[in-house]
C-alpha cells in the first residue's frame, strides 16, 4: 500500500496521487467497517438464537430453499469473476454480458429470499414474534438489502460501460463492485453456516 | 410535554428554546454571510469540497452546539442549586440532561475534532486536500443535518428523555412512545455515518496523501493522533450504526432485540452501546493529545521528547480502548472473572497516558518556553487530567465501583477528563491554528479572561461533585428534599457547583466576544508562521491558497519546517528554483448537500413514523448516489499561470517573514 519514494521522484508523476488506487484502498477500508457491521448482527444473533418465545425455531428452516440460494449466490460470485477477466482482456461485450448474468443471478437470489421470508411470515413467524426472529430477519435482511443495492449499482455501471467503454475509471468501478460482490458472498457463507446449517443440525 | 402535538407548547422554557434555536440558526447564517456574500453562499460554502472551508463550518457548528449544550448544563445546575426546587418540570429536566450529554459528545466534541482534522491534517502532510473531498463534504453535511434534526426536537414533537445513551427498556416504545426518542436515534444515526466516513477518509489521507518525501516516522504527532483516532472510529462506529438500527427495528417494526418480553435482552444494548461508547471517549481525547504535542514542542522551541513512545502510546490507547467497555456496568453481574479483565484493561490505559504526560513535561524541561494562549490551556490540562485520570482508576477498581456507580463521583470524573482533556485540548488547538486558517490571532487579554473564568469555574463546579458522590447523591436526580439538603450537606455543595457552572458560562461569553472582537482587531498574521512553528502548515501563507502547496514540500525528517528555517538562516543559502506544474483539484459539487437534505427527509419521516416520507427520503438518497456515479467530470487543473499569479500576491508577505528570521 505504501508508495515508494522512488516512484514519486520520477518526473512523470508530478507528485499527483493515483486517484483510482486511492479509491480502491478506501473501499477496502469501507469493507472492514461493513464486516464489523455484519459481525455485530452475528453477535446479537448468537446471543438471541435460542430466544424463540415458543414460536418458529431454527430447526424449521426450509433446507432445499437455502441450499439453492447459496448455490445461486456462489455462481454469481463466479460470474462476476468472469466479468473481471473479460475486462482485463479488454472485452467490453463479454464484460457487460457477464455483469448482466451476475445481476440476474443476484436478483434470483433476492427473489428466493423474499419468497422464504413471505412463507415464514405466512406461518406466523414474523419479526415481532420473538427475539430470535428479530435477529434472524435483521441479519439475513441486511445481507439481502446489500445484494439488492449491489444489483442496482451494477445496472448503473452497465449503462456507464456501454457509454464510456473500458477506461481507467470504469475499470476501477468494476473492480470495486466485484470486491463488494465477493464480500457479500463471503458474508453469505457465514450466514449459511451459522444461521442455516447450525440451525437445522 | 405535549407529545401528541406536532409543535411542543405550554412551557415557557420551551418557548425560550424555540428562540435560542432560531438565534442559533441566525448565527449560522450570519457567520456564513460574514465571510462571503449571500449570493456566494451556495458556490463557496454549501458546495465546497475544500477541507479548510469544511473545517471552518465544523468549527462554527461545534461552537454553536457548545453554547446549546452549555445552556442545558446551566439549566440543570439551576434546578439542582437548592433543595425541593421545581424550577424545571421533571420531564423537562429529563429531556435536558439527555440533550446535554448527546449534544456535548456527538454534536460538540466530534465536530470540533473534525474541524481540527480538516483544518490541519492535509496542511501538516503537505497535501492538497483529503483523499476523498466529496465524501468529506458529505460527512460534514450528514453531521450538520443530524444535529439539526436532533435540535428541532425541542420545537417539534418533543425531545428524547431517556438519558444520553438511551438504555432500553426505557427507550423502547412501551416506555418512551412518540417522536422524541426517534429524534435521538436518527440525529445520531445520520451524524454517525458521517463520522465513519470521515474516519475512512483520514486513514486513506494519512497513508497515501503525504508529500512523497514524508515517511510515517516523519509525520507530526497531531497527524499520528488523527490516525489512531480514525482507526478507533473504524472499529467502533459500525457498532453504533447497528445498535441504533436495532433500536429502530424494535421501535418501528415491532422487533424484540432489547424489549423485556418475547426473549429480548436489554443488557445486550448496554454492552453494544458501550463497545462504541467507551472507545468514543478515546476517539475524542486522542486528537487533543495530538494538539498538546504540537503546542508543547512549538512553545518550548524543542523537538518533542520521546516521539516514538508518543506514537506507540497513542496506538496502544486506541487498541486497548476496545477492551474496557464493561467497566460502565460492573454491576451487571457478569461475575468477578469478567469484571477483573475489564478492570485491568481500564487501568492499563493509564500507563500510556502517563507516558505521554511525562513526555510533554520533559519536552518543556530546559526549553525556551513562551506562555501563549494555547500553552495556557496545556498548563490547565496537566493537573486537571491527572486528577481526572486518577479518579478514573478509582472507578476502574470493580469492587469499589459498586459504591461509586452512577453517583456524582462518576459525573465529576468524566467531566474532569472530558473538559480537562478534550475541551481544553480542542480550545488549545483552536487558538493555535486560528491564525493559520483565518489569518489573524485571537485577542490575548479577552482570551485570558475566558481562560481564568473557565479554570476557576471548572474547579468550583466539579470538585464539590466528588464529595456529593460520596454523600450518596446519584446522577440524573431531579431534586432532593430538605433533610438531604441541609442535614446531609448536599445543598451548600450543590449551590457552589452551580456558581461554578455560571463562571464557566461567563468564560464562554468572553471567548465568543474574543472571536468577534478579533475579527476586526486581532493581530494579523502576515508571515504564515504565526508562532515560529515546526511543521509544514507554517511554511505556507495564512490563510493558505486553495491548493495549499504550490510545490509539494520536501521533508528531511521530523519538524520539517523548523529545519528548513535553520537551513535558510545559514550563510550562502540559495532557495531552490521553483517550477510550478498544473495542480489537480476536485470540483465543487452540490451532491453532498442535496443528499443530506434527502437524509433529513428520511430521518424526519421515520421519526414521526410516517413511512411514506421516510421511503421518499431514502429513494432520494439512492437517486443522488446514482447521480454521483454518473458524474465523470469531477476534477480540474489549476493552470501554471494562475498558480504564479496567486503565489506572487501571497509571497510578498512571506519574503518579509523570511528576512525577519
Image (cartoon, rainbow, N blue to C red):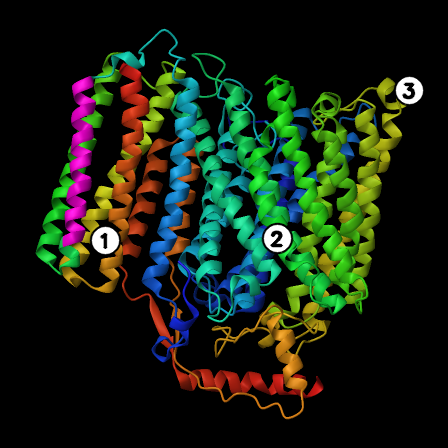
Identify the residue at horizontal 65%, vertical 48% (top origin).
B66
Q: Are marks 1 and 3 in one subunit?
A: no
Q: How much space separates mark 1 and mark 2, taking CA atoms?
A: 36 Å
On the picture, is B22 further left or further right than B366? left
Where residue B262 appears, x then y in whole percent? 43, 12
State the residue position of label 3.
B487
Circle on res. B287: 2
Q: Which residue is mark 1?
A: A174
Residue that appears at 77% across and 58% down: B362
Question: For the point 33% across and 32% down, which residue is it?
Answer: A142
Residue A71 is a magenta residue: yes
Q: Quadrant of residue B290?
A: bottom right
- Check chain identity for marks 2 and 3: say if they share one: yes
In magenta, the rendered stretch is A63-85
- Give percent across and percent down for residue B130: 46, 62
| Quarter of the rendering occupied by the C terminus of chain B | bottom right
Marks 1 & 2, CB-CB < 8 Å contact = no
Residue A130 at x, y = what percent?
38, 14
Task: Please tell me whether the stretch drawn in magenta is mainly helix, strand or loop.
Answer: helix
Contact between marks 2 and 3 (CB within 8 A): the answer is no
Amino acid at each position: 500500500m505504501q508508495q515508494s519514494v522512488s516512484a514519486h521522484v520520477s518526473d512523470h508523476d508530478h507528485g499527483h496521487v493515483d486517484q483510482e488506487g486511492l479509491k480502491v484502498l478506501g473501499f477496502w477500508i469501507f469493507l472492514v467497517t461493513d464486516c464489523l457491521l455484519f459481525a455485530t448482527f452475528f453477535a446479537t444473533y448468537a446471543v438471541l438464537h435460542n430466544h424463540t418465545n415458543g414460536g418458529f425455531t431454527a430447526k424449521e428452516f426450509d433446507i432445499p430453499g437455502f441450499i439453492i440460494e447459496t448455490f445461486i449466490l456462489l455462481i454469481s460470485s463466479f460470474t462476476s469473476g468472469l466479468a473481471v477477466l473479460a475486462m482485463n482482456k479488454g472485452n467490453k461485450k463479454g464484460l457487460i454480458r457477464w455483469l448482466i448474468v451476475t445481476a440476474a443471478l443476484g436478483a434470483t437470489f433476492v427473489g428466493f429470499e423474499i419468497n422464504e421470508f413471505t412463507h415464514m411470515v405466512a406461518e406466523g413467524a414474523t419479526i415481532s414474534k420473538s427475539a430470535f426472529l428479530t435477529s434472524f430477519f435483521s441479519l439475513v435482511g441486511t445481507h439481502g438489502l446489500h445484494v439488492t443495492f449491489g444489483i442496482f449499482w451494477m445496472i448503473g455501471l452497465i449503462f456507464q460501460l456501454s457509454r464510456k467503454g473500458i477506461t481507467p475509471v470504469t475499470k476501477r468501478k468494476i473492480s470495486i463492485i466485484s470486491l463488494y460482490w465477493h464480500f457479500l458472498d463471503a458474508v453469505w457463507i457465514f450466514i449459511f453456516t451459522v444461521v442455516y446449517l447450525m440451525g437445522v443440525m | 410535554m405535549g407529545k401528541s402535538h406536532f409543535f411542543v407548547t405550554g412551557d415557557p422554557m420551551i418557548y425560550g428554546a424555540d428562540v435560542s434555536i432560531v438565534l442559533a440558526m441566525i448565527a449560522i447564517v450570519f457567520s456564513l454571510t460574514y465571510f462571503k456574500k449571500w449570493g456566494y453562499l451556495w458556490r463557496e460554502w454549501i458546495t465546497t469540497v475544500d477541507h479548510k472551508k469544511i473545517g471552518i463550518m465544523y468549527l462554527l457548528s461545534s461552537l454553536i452546539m457548545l453554547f446549546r449544550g452549555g445552556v442545558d448544563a446551566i439549566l440543570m445546575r439551576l434546578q439542582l442549586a437548592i433543595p425541593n426546587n421545581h424550577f424545571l418540570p421533571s420531564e423537562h429536566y429529563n429531556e435536558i440532561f439527555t440533550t446535554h450529554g448527546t449534544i456535548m459528545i456527538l454534536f460538540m466534541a466530534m465536530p470540533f475534532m473534525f474541524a481540527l482534522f480538516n483544518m490541519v491534517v492535509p496542511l501538516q502532510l503537505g497535501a492538497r486536500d483529503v483523499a476523498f473531498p466529496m465524501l468529506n463534504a458529505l460527512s460534514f453535511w450528514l453531521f450538520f443535518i443530524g444535529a439539526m434534526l436532533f435540535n428541532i426536537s425541542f420545537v417539534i414533537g418533543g425531545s428524547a428523555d431517556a438519558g444520553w445513551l438511551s438504555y432500553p427498556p426505557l427507550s423502547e416504545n412501551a416506555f418512551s412512545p412518540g417522536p422524541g426518542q426517534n429524534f435521538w436515534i436518527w440525529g445520531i444515526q445520520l451524524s454517525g455515518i458521517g463520522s465513519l466516513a470521515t474516519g475512512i477518509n483520514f486513514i486513506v489521507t494519512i497513508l497515501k496523501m503525504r508529500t512523497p518525501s514524508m515517511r510515517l516516522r516523519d509525520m507530526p504527532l497531531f497527524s499520528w493522533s488523527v490516525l489512531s483516532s480514525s482507526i478507533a472510529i473504524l472499529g467502533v462506529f459500525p457498532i453504533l450504526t447497528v445498535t441504533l438500527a436495532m433500536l429502530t427495528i424494535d421501535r418501528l417494526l415491532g422487533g424484540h432485540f432489547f424489549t423485556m418480553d418475547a426473549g429480548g435482552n436489554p443488557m445486550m444494548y448496554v454492552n453494544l452501546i458501550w463497545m462504541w461508547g467507551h472507545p468514543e471517549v478515546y476517539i475524542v481525547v486522542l486528537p487533543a493529545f495530538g494538539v498538546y504535542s504540537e503546542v508543547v514542542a512549538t512553545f518550548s522551541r524543542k523537538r518533542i521528547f520521546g516521539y516514538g513512545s508518543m506514537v506507540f502510546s497513542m496506538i496502544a490507547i486506541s487498541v486497548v480502548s476496545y477492551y474496557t467497555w464493561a467497566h460502565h456496568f460492573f454491576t451487571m453481574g457478569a461475575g468477578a472473572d469478567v469484571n477483573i479483565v475489564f478492570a485491568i484493561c481500564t487501568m492499563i490505559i493509564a500507563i500510556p497516558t502517563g507516558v505521554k504526560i511525562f513526555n510533554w513535561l520533559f519536552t518543556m524541561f530546559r526549553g525556551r518556553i513562551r506562555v501563549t494562549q494555547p500553552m495556557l490551556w496545556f498548563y490547565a490540562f496537566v493537573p486537571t487530567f491527572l486528577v481526572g485520570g486518577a479518579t478514573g482508576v478509582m472507578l476502574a477498581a470493580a469492587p469499589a465501583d459498586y459504591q461509586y456507580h452512577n453517583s456524582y463521583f462518576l459525573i465529576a470524573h468524566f467531566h474532569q477528563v472530558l473538559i480537562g482533556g478534550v475541551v481544553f485540548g480542542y480550545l488549545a488547538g483552536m487558538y493555535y491554528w486560528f491564525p493559520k486558517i483565518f489569518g489573524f490571532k485571537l485577542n490575548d487579554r479577552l482570551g485570558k479572561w475566558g481562560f481564568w473564568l473557565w479554570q476557576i469555574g471548572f474547579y468550583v463546579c466539579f470538585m464539590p461533585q466528588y464529595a456529593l458522590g460520596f454523600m450518596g447523591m446519584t446522577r440524573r436526580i431531579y431534586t432532593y428534599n430538605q433533610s438531604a439538603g441541609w442535614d446531609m450537606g448536599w445543598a451548600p455543595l450543590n449551590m457552589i457547583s452551580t456558581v461554578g457552572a455560571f463562571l464557566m458560562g461567563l468564560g464562554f461569553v468572553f471567548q465568543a466576544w474574543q472571536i468577534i472582537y478579533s475579527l476586526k482587531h486581532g493581530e494579523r498574521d502576515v508571515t504564515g508562521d504565526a508562532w515560529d512553528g515546526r511543521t509544514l502548515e507554517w511554511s505556507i501563507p495564512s490563510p493558505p491558497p486553495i491548493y495549499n502547496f504550490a510545490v509539494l514540500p520536501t521533508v528531511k525528517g521530523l519538524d520539517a519546517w523548523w529545519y528548513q528555517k535553520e537551513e535558510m538562516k545559514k550563510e550562502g543559502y540559495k532557495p531552490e528554483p521553483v517550477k510550478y506544474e498544473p495542480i489537480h483539484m476536485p470540483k465543487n459539487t452540490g451532491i453532498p448537500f442535496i443528499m443530506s437534505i434527502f437524509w433529513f427527509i428520511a430521518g424526519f419521516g421515520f421519526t414521526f413514523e410516517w413511512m411514506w416520507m421516510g421511503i421518499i427520503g431514502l429513494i432520494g438518497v439512492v437517486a443522488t448516489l446514482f447521480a454521483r456515479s454518473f458524474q465523470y467530470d469531477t476534477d480540474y487543473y489549476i493552470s501554471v499561470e494562475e498558480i504564479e499569479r496567486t503565489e506572487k500576491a501571497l509571497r510578498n508577505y512571506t519574503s518579509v517573514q523570511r528576512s525577519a528570521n
